Image (spheres, rainbow, N blue to C red):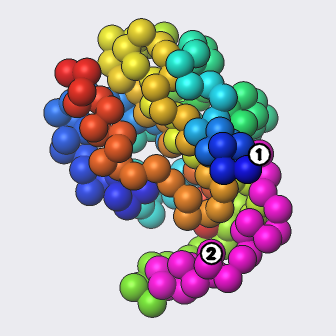
């Protein structure tokens, strides 16, 4: 999310509408927005129907708590990132979906670990090639 | 093996019509895929909000 926010101005310039999706409870989502000043709408998918449609399932414990994932968490903490109490499901994995103006999926990334995200530059490059 | 992993990582919805979602935000405003068909849209699926 941090990487995405660092290119917020270019996202706006390219006219990309960003929606962050969560399965967590409404109250957690409201707190998250207050704490992070999230600039984009936070959509509530409590049934996880959209997660499931895009194949974003719950990971195994090994995917969530493997040594690499723990090391990346520790690096964030050492950098001063506050790690709050998580929602009610540690194992749900995320991902990213880029949809073109015709409603066609142009990028579909299913995370295989907590820190597995597509490069932001790859997302911007895909949109730039069409603008 | 590598091809299977790559397929899994990219997912199987590439090049297909996006799901016509209709979801509320934290303020109660309902957002639909069809609201922004003249724009690129990026859906960022969060893990948990911790």
Asked if residue A2 is positioned above or below residue B45 in the image, the reply reads below
The chain letter under disc 1 is: A
Instruction: Give the secondary structure at mark 2.
Output: helix
Q: Magenta span has A68?
A: yes
Residue A88 in view: no
Residue at horizontal 62 percent and vertical 25 percent from the top: B13
> Residue at the location (26% across, 57% down)?
A6
Q: Earlier in the sequence, mark 1 or mark 2?
A: 1
Q: Residue A130's x, y, as percent?
A: 25, 21
Q: Does residue A7 appear in the picture of this structure? A: yes
* Labels in figure, total: 2
- Is residue A83 found inside the magenta-colored segment of the image? no
Mark 1 is surrounded, within 10 Å at the Cα level, by few (under 14), some (14 to 19) or many (20 or more) other residues, namely some
For image coordinates 44% across by 63% down, the residue present is A35
Label 1: which secondary element: loop
Q: Which residue is mark 1?
A: A57
Q: Which residue is mark 2?
A: A69
Tell me residue A65's x, y (percent): 73, 75
Q: Quadrant of the C terminus of chain A?
A: top left
Task: Tell me the residue at 22%/35% (across/down).
Answer: A12
Give the image location of residue B15, x and y in percent.
Answer: 53, 19
Tell me whether marks 1 and 2 sit on the same chain. Answer: yes
Q: Are marks 1 and 2 in contact (CB under 8 Å)?
A: no
Left or right of residue A24: residue B15: left
**Which span of residues is magenta-colored?**
A56-77
Left or right: B8, with B44 as reference point? right
Where B18 falls versus A55 (above or below)?
above
């Amino acid at each position: 999310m941090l990487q995405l926010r660092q290119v917020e101005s270019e996202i706006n310039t390219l006219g990309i509408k960003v929606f962050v999706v969560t399965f967590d409870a409404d109250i957690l989502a409201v707190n998250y927005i207050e704490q992070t000043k999230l600039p984009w709408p936070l959509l509530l998918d409590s049934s996880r129907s959209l997660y499931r449609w895009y194949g974003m399932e719950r990971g195994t414990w090994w995917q969530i708590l493997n040594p690499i994932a723990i090391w990346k968490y520790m690096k964030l903490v050492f950098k001063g990132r506050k790690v709050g109490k998580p929602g009610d499901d540690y194992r749900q994995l995320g991902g990213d979906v880029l949809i073109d103006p015709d409603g066609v999926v142009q990028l579909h990334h299913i995370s295989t670990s907590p820190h597995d995200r597509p490069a932001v530059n790859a997302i911007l490059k895909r949109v730039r090639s069409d603008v | 093996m590598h091809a299977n992993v790559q397929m899994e990582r990219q997912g199987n919805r590439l090049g297909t019509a996006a799901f016509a979602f209709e979801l509320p935000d934290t303020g109660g405003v309902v957002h639909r895929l069809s609201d922004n068909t003249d724009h690129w849209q990026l859906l960022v699926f969060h893990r948990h909000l911790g």
